[in-house]
Amino acid sequence: MFTIGAHSQSTQQRRFFIGSLCLGILCSALVTTETLQAQVFAVPVPVGGGAVDAGDTTSSPHKMPGFSISVDEKKLNLLDDYERYIRHQMWEKALTALKELSETKSTSPLLPTKDGFLVDAEQRIFMALVSMPAEGREAFRLFFDGKAKKQFEDLSAQNGLLTSDRITKAKQIYSQYFLTSIGDDVADLLGNDAFERGEFVPAARFWRSILDHHPDTNLSEIDLNVKYALALIRSRQTEQAAATIQVISQQFPGKKIRLGGEDVDPVPYLQALTPRGAETPSAAAPQHHQLANLLQQPLKLPQEKVKPQWQLSYLDKTMVQAIENSRRNYYGRGKSYETFVPPMAVDEKRAYFNFYGVCFGVDLQTGKLVWRTDKFQDLGTHFSNYSFHQSSNPAQYQITVANDIVLATLIPKKEMNHYRARYRLYAYNGATGKQLWTSNVSNESYLSKPLVEGGHVYVVSHLQNNKSLTLNCLSLKTGKKEWSLKLGAAVSTSNSNGREKMPIPLLQKEGDNLLVLTNNGALFEISIPTKSINWVFRYPYKVNQSNTHYYYAAVPEETELHSEGQIFRDQNLVYFKEAGADEVYALNLAEKRLVWKRPIKKSAQIVGLDQKNVYLLSKELEALDRKSHRLNWAVSLPVAAGGLSALVAPEEAWVFTSRGIFEISKTNGDILNIYRGSDKTSLGGAIALRKGLVICVSNQAVTAYPTAKPAKSLPTSGNEKSGP
């Protein structure tokens, strides 16, 4: 049991709550080290600063062009008034505005910060409160300390369990009067309650607020740090937990806490609950699940004369002729179909592909076609149909696999010639291809690659003729919708046929949170346990609704290469670039801060990340320094098709092009070798390493080459794109 330092105003309520806290702490001890170690976590990699280019970030990110998110304008105006009064040291008016701000019922859960973020309204108001200067804090206590004490005493005087009404009242006291003398007491009470309920993220936030913003607290600082670290561990925020454990070891060496009736050294106790590899922050090699496509050992391809282990051609002469006829009949508008590379998903036994709705499975070792949902040549009739050109968006054909279930978004064969056909979500048995279920909600079309976690499927959809995006959680077993969350309204663009095209969001899961890159001017973090928005980062999105290549005009490079938006993450640092955007961003999620951004051409797509560089691929491979965001080197490559990807080894990078596989030095961008391979008539495409095989997926075939020395493949993660 913790021995918690008593505040001078300790109450009967506080004594009652110690029992609940003990139960919560003892429950945390039941989490075995083995269970936690079964989860994969990364060791933090410190990244230096660099110039922060936040020139066009404003205090009203919701008003930027692009994705539309509703904000409570009345509360926003009150917040602006409050901050203006603070700047002019008009304390009485500031406190009046703050009181009205806290008591006004909100019509939207989000309010903007000055750094381009939209955060929870209560959190934003709290940020404004604790940023008050010392003179304002004195005025605040003079005005409200007596009232705050009375409310807290009335709350504490009530006997019995903490009901939801009493917790709501405590939260009101916390949000309105945290800077008073009882602010630390109510924060500790709320932290204990949240921990007891299994709500570890808010528990950590309440305890952290005392450590950060209540320096005169009489509560035990070591107890607060230990409870904060426990909440971080239970919410799988291991990097912050490791840093807190280090603080405890440095600031309280040899000091013990009371736990379960015994004096316990908190450092080894907390380390025993922390997953292996996350005990202390260090600059050790980053975990592969966070630095996607980063190989842990050198990659060696066989000599030119060595034949591939297998090759499967899916594009027959019938399809080739149909695509050529499509381009000729529709003024060249079918050109991007020539460069489409089907997305791939891989498990331990098979690779799976989605070629315009024809899904098929291939044995990973033999290359044998195990199953397919339709005949490839049957697609030819659809390429000759004008409705298909109007409705089809190649980026919406997605595929993923988990627990031997293959999930694919596609237009059903019988609907491919329908105007504005909907993209459905299908589930197939990975071994047989048998359809298990389809999500067929009336008028709903699925946009994103499904993300699977446990028995749940996360996917973004919209209703036809409606631009509002919805995040859905479905049952992996049945496809039944478990819950959904409205994100906001997208701004559609035009495709090569002058028709409306919706953005394709990208999902990535980290702990209990889900990142959603809208590819439309907004990056969301969603709390899965609370089914709510933690924050949104907004940035300008340049909308092109003009039909710039309707007839004979050249197809833009980003259309020809099917460039996708991507997120790559290394601990709290996130690097992303949207499809069709001309800027790449680096964010620090822990500090909710833009680290840097820099211009880049629209066709570039992030394809890799290591400790030094961010790698982007278009018709050249570019290496951007992670620290300074300067261009370290660039090399032109014969890239002519979609599936933009790269394998990043310790010293080299590998890219599959129209002239074979290029081996490129990561030191200076020099081309070291070219492996021509066996797919010599293709336009190139995607490259992946799985089970000791280098798999190259082109616009016409799938080819697997054995590595000279079998390299351990990396597990598929939320970072990786829908293709290889």
Image (cartoon, grey):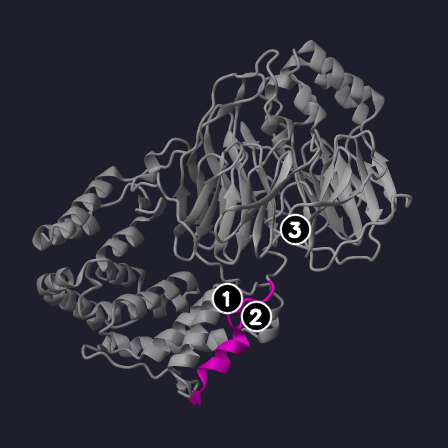
51 over 154 or under it: above or below: above
| Local secondary structure at mark 2 | loop
- Badge 3 crowding class, 10 Å Cα cut-off, few under 14, some 14 to 19, many 20 or more, is many
Q: Is residue 575 magenta?
A: no
Mark 2 near mark 1, Cβ–Cβ under 8 Å? Answer: yes
Q: Which residue is mark 3?
A: 666
> Gap between marks 2 and 1, in whole Å?
8 Å
Q: Is residue 263 magenta?
A: yes
Q: Is residue 644 left or right of residue 216?
A: right
Q: Is residue 95 left or right of residue 600?
A: left
Camera sees residue 30? no
Q: Residue at x 49, y 47 (%)?
A: 629
597 over 500 or under it: above or below: below
Mark 2 near mark 3, Cβ–Cβ under 8 Å? Answer: no
The image quarter containing residue 299 is bottom right
Residue 48 pos. (x, y %): 46, 58
Looking at marks 2 and 3 on the same chain, the residue that comes earlier in the sequence is marked by 2
- Badge 2 crowding class, 10 Å Cα cut-off, few under 14, some 14 to 19, many 20 or more, is many
The image quarter containing residue 68 is top left
Residue 496 pos. (x, y %): 58, 19
Give the number of the disc on residue 468: none
Looking at marks 1 and 3 on the same chain, the residue that comes earlier in the sequence is marked by 1
Q: Which residue is mark 1?
A: 238
- Badge 1 crowding class, 10 Å Cα cut-off, few under 14, some 14 to 19, many 20 or more, is many
Looking at marks 2 and 1 on the same chain, the residue that comes earlier in the sequence is marked by 1
Closest to the observer, 381 or 628: 628
Inspect the image, locate mark 2, and give the three-letter code of the amino acid beneath it: Pro
Q: Which residue is mark 2?
A: 275
> Gap between marks 2 and 3, in whole Å?
32 Å
State which region is magenta.
261-285
